[in-house]
Amino acid sequence: MNATLYRDTLDEKIFQIPVCGFCILQIDEEVAKLLELKARLGGDDGKHQFVLKTAKETLTGKYGEDSKLIYDLKDQGGELLSLRYDLTVPFARYLAMNKITNIKRYHIAKVYRRDNPAMTRGRYREFYQCDFDIAGQYDAMIPDAECLKIVYEILSQLDLGDFRIKVNDRRILDGMFAVCGVPDDKFRTICSTVDKLDKMPWEDVKKEMVNEKGLSEEAADQIGEYVSMQGGMDLAERLLQDQKMSQSKQACAGLSDIKLLFSYLQLFQVTDKVVFDLSLARGLDYYTGIIYEAVLSQAGVESVSVGSVAGGGRYDGLVGMFDPKGRKVPCVGVSIGIERIFSIMEQKAEASAEKVRTTEVQVMVASAQKNLLEERLKLVTELWNAGIKAEVMYKKNPKLLSQLQHCEESGIPLVAILGEQELKDGVVKLRVVATREEVDICRADLIEEVRRRTSDAS
Amino acid sequence: MNATLYRDTLDEKIFQIPVCGFCILQIDEEVAKLLELKARLGGDDGKHQFVLKTAKETLTGKYGEDSKLIYDLKDQGGELLSLRYDLTVPFARYLAMNKITNIKRYHIAKVYRRDNPAMTRGRYREFYQCDFDIAGQYDAMIPDAECLKIVYEILSQLDLGDFRIKVNDRRILDGMFAVCGVPDDKFRTICSTVDKLDKMPWEDVKKEMVNEKGLSEEAADQIGEYVSMQGGMDLAERLLQDQKMSQSKQACAGLSDIKLLFSYLQLFQVTDKVVFDLSLARGLDYYTGIIYEAVLSQAGVESVSVGSVAGGGRYDGLVGMFDPKGRKVPCVGVSIGIERIFSIMEQKAEASAEKVRTTEVQVMVASAQKNLLEERLKLVTELWNAGIKAEVMYKKNPKLLSQLQHCEESGIPLVAILGEQELKDGVVKLRVVATREEVDICRADLIEEVRRRTSDAS
């Protein structure tokens, strides 16, 4: 349960009423109260620090140019609020607040972006993310490789068609910018422009770099050469020998890690889908090492462009930003975009003739005659109490036809029919909806019979 | 998926960008743009109406005096926002917007209340609710009884100790207020005061009625007599004969339905926990018929007072409030408070010696010697690909002791140990953590052996 995450005690001196994802403060009044309380508790020995933070402060400075998509909220009580933008920053905050130094967990929850929605492509302002993260001080690239293995497994098992996982490293990007002559203070903004390469042709990206961001044409052209490169471990080896790239220590560290990563990915048997791609940038500021993004190939799915369906990377500095003493907890993780995957699955389901069942009900308790509501309720209770998924129509005297129609429409496989005769004989007429076959079953054997007939179907 | 709920089209002329639970409007600018668009689309034939609604308007007028707990938010772009207060109002809005006239569904999601949190009792500002609702035009009390059956099943199966489900009817309350001489315009506010009877003694409730709400002492005393009554079907029958109560048509309708409800509850075998209790009020304005609330008896659990863990009722008018033509869809439902139930389960778990496993990992792939990371990764891949829940430590050369300790701490039952000798012999040493028994298993048989040994444990 997430809700148990933020039980900060007064003892910890974190004066927030945090409700996962939000920090709520009535600043003016509360500061006065807390200072008074602090004075009464005695002493200001430096150890006890008041941490006054609003959700906005929690979120800013972490997403780069995407920050404009944060939902900033302000409620009528003067409390400053923002809706969470992703699950990564709240996770990092949780680790810091609870002094957790290693954990592996997944988390499925909603996030909010003030973006332009595009319903058909599965882009909403409120949407689900499924995050998986590994936090802790470990040997290089082992947890990173596991994250990629997990993305590979998920996308393979969901059967969404062919996919690729692009991999790069923030240090390689920074090293590349340095050796191409990008000024230090322009790394982040140029990185955001490179991130647009999956939506814009290189010519437009270059224009933005030169005209909007003030980069020299020469530097832009050099970047252009590098970002067109794709490969595997071999490309990393080649770039380690590259005259320019090898001048950057940072780039070399990143390239060595890419090599190591690919050696683990080979053991995990996933290299057939993973590509080292120097154009992958990812706009978020918090990444410090490896970054990756999974994209579906369009071949299998007609005319649906959903872009990337998963992305992530290493963020070794984020937890430390929330820790009063700056203690770092290295992290690597991945976010899966649920709606984007669902929009593809929906299109696939629509394209196929197969009907998707929206209920798991195994048997409908029905009657052909009037005044048998009580008998139906008695029988459905027997089935429910035995753990069988059963249903009755909420009518005193429903027509048999409408009961059977409901079963056909919602794919309920069996109907247990009661009539005066069946009650007299101590039996139930069990009807198989698909074949219309009917057979009298002794009432005492009904539960066993329903179980037997639905055990392979469900 | 909820996120697919609100796909309003331009065609419907509902100019909102709704993200479940929120309606977002940039009113000033947008109105101008839309009027222009409307003019261009041509015609104002009366059919196309602009519906401009903010989240606040969506939520107000539905929760009575509890409205003050709604999180009203205002973001910097001037969009008016509120966080959802419960799942019922968004559900009703969804039915109206999508013209759904019957559905049965459950929904687990977060809601927000600007209340004072009480962590130990499982009360937070942000918390989960689990809702179950049945919408549709059906015969009286059949879906209502099913909701109570479900609450009974959940609370029984969670094994939280003894519980009671209190039942009443909004019409009985209103009828009672009428025959006791409460003025019409004070029904709602007096109802809110009656709702406090589970937290305050009658004397204080009476004081609030008389001193704060201006009710006559005589009327308050008459209410006091009724709200002390508890029983079953018999009490409903008695009150139908009650000289005063029988004067109210509304009360009689409610009492007849309570009788009918109890007859269904008998068939569902749940009457041992259900009590007809005239003091049950529930503050929310949207209820129109039966209301109910489940409370845990304190006997089983030491010193934990969590109050009600589930509540709900019939709300036949709510969907119509969101429908442009006011079309009604009768609904009945229940909300289960997840945190409150979890806080009890946590206390129970703490009290018992039993260790709760936080991972489902079946086997840890370990090694006793150095330089076997690659071999460990190969083996864990074999296990993962076979669908076995397996783990490796993210270290190149972890100590065997720390690997075994991790298994003991997190309750991982098996360890698959690799060493030079095992690799040479084509075997894996399988260790049972609990007994420390070790046995060499032929590598080809390992998956089967792990499955066999964990099939009953997991």
Image (cartoon, coloured by chain):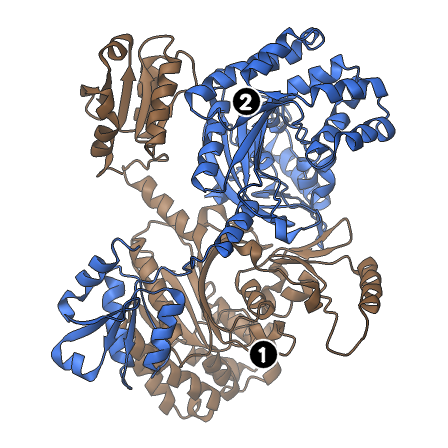
Chain colours: A blue, B brown
Closest to the observer, B181 or A300: A300
Q: Give the quadrant of the C terminus of chain B.
A: top left
Q: Position of residue A35 (x, y in %)?
A: 68, 36
Kindly identify which numbered label has been placed on residue B327.
Answer: 1
| In the image: residue B84, left or right of residue A141 | right
Q: Position of residue B406 (x, y in %)?
A: 35, 23
Q: Which residue, given by chain and number where applicable, does mark 2 sit on?
A: A330
| In the image: residue B314, left or right of residue A35 | left
B109, above or below A142, in the image: below
Q: Chain of mark 2?
A: A
Circle 2: residue type: Pro
Q: Chain of mark 1?
A: B
Q: Position of residue A124 (x, y in %)?
A: 63, 50
Circle 1: residue type: Arg
A32, above or below B278, in the image: above
Instruction: Give the total of numbered labels.
Output: 2
